[in-house]
Amino acid sequence: MVVQTERDDATWYECENCGLLFDEQSDASEHERHCDDTDPSYIQ
């Protein structure tokens, strides 16, 4: 499930599995479908 959060006067969408933030809800939803609940291999 994607969580909407407010930071720095902007709305962000967070993957509940790994905590990665996205500025578009559709991007976050797409990521979460493929997220395997491990730390991402790239810097957040």
Image: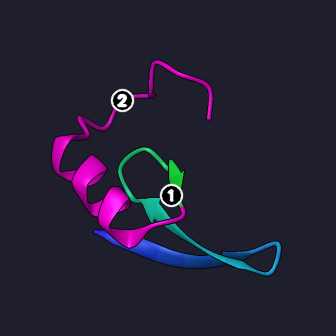
Quadrant, the C terminus = top right
Q: Position of residue 24 (x, y in %)?
A: 45, 67
The reply, left or right, for residue 30 in relation to residue 16 is: left
Q: Position of residue 37 (x, y in %)?
A: 31, 38
**Residue at 50% over, 48% down:** 20
**Residue at 30% over, 66% down:** 26
Q: CA distance from mark 2 to mark 1?
A: 17 Å
Let me know if residue 37 is in the magenta part.
Answer: yes
Numbered mark located on residue 38 in the image: 2
Farthest left residue in view: 33
Going by the numbered disc 2, the residue's amino acid type is Thr
Numbered mark located on residue 22 in the image: 1
Q: Position of residue 7 (x, y in %)?
A: 75, 73
> Which segment is the magenta one?
23-44
**Residue at 59% over, 77% down:** 5
Going by the numbered disc 1, the residue's amino acid type is Phe
Quadrant, the N terminus = bottom left
Between 31 and 3, the residue placed more toward the observer is 31
The reply, left or right, for residue 14 in relation to residue 37 is: right
